[in-house]
Amino acid sequence: MDIKIVVTQEEHYQYAETICNTIEISAKLRGTGIAKRTPDYILQKMQSKDAIIALVNNEFAGFCYIESWEHAKFVAHSGLIVHPKYRNLGLAKKIKSKVFDYSLRKYPNAKVFGITTGLPVMKINSDLGYKPVPFSELTTDPSFWKGCKTCTNYEILKSKDNKMCLCTGMLYDPKEKQKIPPKHPFNLKVLNRLKKIKEALFLKK
């Protein structure tokens, strides 16, 4: 299978609506909280070349984009999605690795961070050298947290003054000397237990 993973160009603008629909459907099926994206916003990221797309014979297969905060002091990778037709092929990891390397070149002085409830994404991040951190180590830019308003878990985040939610914060600091294998290896049992504890605390009725 010939999978192309590239920085978005004008020829890829046509996929913006498909990308948004795929992200939304996936979130509903998994029952996870996720900030909604609009086709216009995805298009904006494509135009600024802050996005990576995966294609198979010109058919949409996957996507991820970059956001920058505090004058590029921090960057985050958002909207990571693989079309159902191309899942279980390791494509998410390939896309994430591509956008990770690309963002390090485009924003060489930025700390790379993310917040997620997905254990597969945590695993990918950990393999790249991210470490779990409290939200206090992430950007304080209100624009970032404003983006969480469309997430189903936003009321939890707001009630905790943006300091805690069901998501786990993860951070990669390019100034730290990285180790291979990563200094903070992924432990599925520990993070899964942490996720269940948060759900029990925050989702109790």
Image (spheres, rainbow, N blue to C red):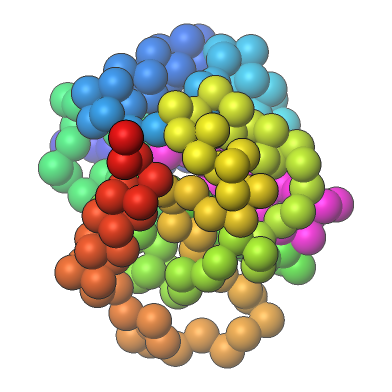
Report x, y in % for residue 6.
Answer: 48, 39
Q: In the shown orientation, is residue 88 left or right of residue 58?
A: left
Q: Residue sitting at 59 percent across and 42 percent down?
A: 159
Q: In the shown orientation, is residue 24 left or right of residue 151?
A: left
Residue toward you, 63 or 78:
78
Report x, y in % for residue 35.
Answer: 51, 29
By secondary structure, the bulk of the magenta-drawn segment is best described as strand
176 shown above or below 117: below
Report x, y in % for residue 108.
Answer: 72, 65
Range shown magenta: 63-80
Residue toward you, 180 or 6:
180
Give the total of numbered labels.
0
The C terminus, quarter of image: top left
Q: In the shown orientation, is residue 131 left or right of residue 137?
A: left
The N terminus, quarter of image: top left
- Residue 18 appears in the figure: yes
181 shown above or below 35: below
Residue 164 lies in the magenta-colored region? no
Residue toward you, 162 or 10:
162
Q: Residue sitting at 40 percent across and 33 percent down?
A: 33
Report x, y in % for residue 54.
Answer: 38, 34
152 shown above or below 97: above
Residue toward you, 95 or 5:
95
- Residue 58 appears in the figure: no
Q: Residue sitting at 35 percent across and 59 percent down?
A: 122
Residue 31 location, quadrant? top left
Residue 91 location, quadrant? top left
Q: Residue furthest front?
A: 205
Q: Residue sitting at 34 percent across and 85 percent down?
A: 181
